[in-house]
Amino acid sequence: MRVYQLAKELNIENKELINKLQDLNIKVNSHMSTIEEEDAALVIELITDENSSESSAGDNVTEMNCEEKKNLTNLNKNDSTELNSKSGVGSSKEKLKKESNSKTSKEDAQKKLDSQKKGSDTIEIGEKIIVKDFAEKLNKNPNEIIMKLIQKGVMAAINQEIDFDSAHDIAAEYEVELLKIEEKTATDDVADVIIEADNVKDLKPRPPVVTVMGHVDHGKTSLLDAIRKTKVTEREAGGITQHIGASEILIDKKRIVFLDTPGHEAFTAMRARGAKVTDIAILVVAADDGVMPQTLEAINHAKAAQVPIIVAINKIDKPGSNPDRVKQELADQGVLIEEYGGDVICVPVSALHGDNIDGLLEMILLVAEMEELKANPNRKATGIVVEAKLDKGRGAVATVLVQNGTLKIGDSVVIGNTCGRIRAMINDKGKNVKSAKPSTAIEITGLSDVPDAGDQMIAVDNDRIAREIVENRKNKIKEEQLKASQKISLDALYQQMQDGQLKELNIILKADVHGSVEAVKQSLNKLTNEKVAIKTIHGGVGAITETDVMLASASNAIIIGFNVRPTANATALAKKEDVDIRPYRIIYNAIEDIEAAMKGMLDPVYKEEELGKAEVRVVFKVPGSGMVAGCYVIEGKILRNAQIRLVRDGIVIHDGTIQSLKRFKDDVKEVATGYECGIGIENFNDIKENDIIEAYHMKELKQT
């Protein structure tokens, strides 16, 4: 508000108002100067009080004059000097009293204004306070408080929070005592949902959760295939499991839940998560290969999780197998089997031929019985996220292992920093279920965001509580990040200057599932040496987008896509910005390439050269040939001898070769942009409408 507007409202002269403002230490230069709303309110209150006091004093004076006149009249009538004397004395006393009251009223108003302007000698705040609110409590300009904070090494804007210690130091400079009050919010009552212990009487037996662990290519997935009688391995890239799979089987009316943790070194983090939620660890060791590096890691994970180990010596039917050597190598690592006087059960099996699978299952049930595994199904569910991903049609999808309680459709859940209400639950057979009891692996939808693999799932009473808990967790993370970025340290700055010779290789990771992002990030960080530091500046789930390319361009980073492809716009933008996008399907290929590039040892390589893209418009079933895709070429050209990649929602579904390429009924060598054609893919029939078929060939390049 401007000074002249306030003067008009108070019905006083501008000059008079300016003088009053200056007396109150409110700086104004002219009638056009602006003053804060709070200051204006105080001035209005003060002047209003003064006017009312003066009015009251005037009324008293008028009454006094009337009384004096009356007394004088009576004096003239009665001619009494004594009465005149008394009347004069009484009137004088009353006048002095009224003037005193008027003076006291003015002093009280002035003291009230001074108290509001200067602030109280004691201020109470919580653990955190926003700079603007803190300045208001001190009755100081926020810019002045910000300057004080900067002098003390704390960078905070007007709407950012500062901690109690920083605020205490500032308040001390103004001779104001700062007191901390304990803040309690609704979220504190359910902070992170304190899980109460179950009554022993409520506990009931539950199925065991079994983790299959071991070295790469020792037959873990094949062993699970033999148990589940499925063919998971054929769907995995290179025959290697790269996502955690959860499934369950029924043996003699008893359930067993299996977690298939990947065996490759890159997935140490995923395997560690599997060991945390497991009751029994099956250590698969190939009889012809023996104990390998990942076998040792699996042993360490199982020991750290304090779970019993069952050794399954696989490939006993293979020529050159030597189970005795495996047993000896295990004994050298502290895993003593029963045959050697230990307590570890050892079962020789053949996953390929299904030999002794029943014996292995009997041992699992025996160990589970000895462990006395129990849970309370009659309570709200708790569990662990095994894997999570973003699905184009269903949104955020998480594979959850229920550990306690019963999870039902419609339950409100908190998972890490996300929440939601369960819309659908799908079991390992792909069927919808309405509830999931302890030791059940299910896929759930209805979450607000993709959780991290390994996050704890907790069912709560309602959506409001779930949102409050998540908001509380996010605020804490934000505060920690803000606090970390506030402190100014010359030591850190000097250290960065000293490390000027250290070069950074910035990497952006995109994968089809969250667990893969974590695993790749860990493996890449291990490649850092004294000359080059690997820095993963971003990791996410889903196709490579324009945002990723812009981030890479701004950060001088390369983009690694694991089982995902860039969108058309992202590819065009990458060419424009000269950003290197490297897609991979086998993760150790990416690790080896980066490691070799760091050492400057790259041999001549084959670079993928994209030929064209075709969109599947319709799918036909041709007798004797399987499924044929009716396509429209949207970019480049499709060659009959080219390799192709089938992409669905940005995720690579299949990588193979073209079996047939036709225009109408004629075989053709190529089809250009804008034409329709029929494409048959060799040994692959899972083709759907709107899939994208990318044709490419490998071009040899010499590294310079």
Image: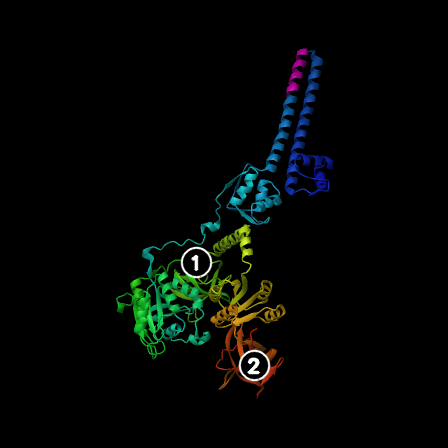
Q: Which residues are magenta?
A: 81-93
- Is residue 671 highlighted in magenta? no
Q: Residue at x 65, y 15 (%)?
A: 86
Look at the image and tell me whether residue 538 can be seen. yes
Element type at mark 2: strand
Q: Position of residue 511 (x, y in %)?
A: 51, 68
Element type at mark 1: strand
Q: Position of residue 25 (x, y in %)?
A: 66, 36
Instruction: Please tell me whether residue 325 is drawn above or below residue 380 in the rendered image.
Output: below
Q: Residue at x 35, y 69 (%)?
A: 283
Instruction: Please tell me whether residue 206 is drawn above or below residue 82 in the rendered image.
Output: below
- Is residue 82 highlighted in magenta? yes
Badge number at residue 458: 1
Q: Position of residue 72 (x, y in %)?
A: 70, 16
Q: Position of residue 350 (x, y in %)?
A: 34, 76
Outermost residue toward the bottom?
Answer: 666
Between the C-alphas of marks 2 and 1, the distance is 47 Å
Neighbor class of circle 1 (other Cα within 10 Å; few <14, some 14-19, many 20+) is: many
Look at the image and tell me whether residue 614 can be seen. no
- Quadrant of the image occupied by residue 673: bottom right
Instruction: Please tell me whether residue 22 is drawn above or below residue 402 in the rendered image.
Output: above
Neighbor class of circle 2 (other Cα within 10 Å; few <14, some 14-19, many 20+) is: many
Q: Are marks 2 and 1 in contact (CB under 8 Å)?
A: no
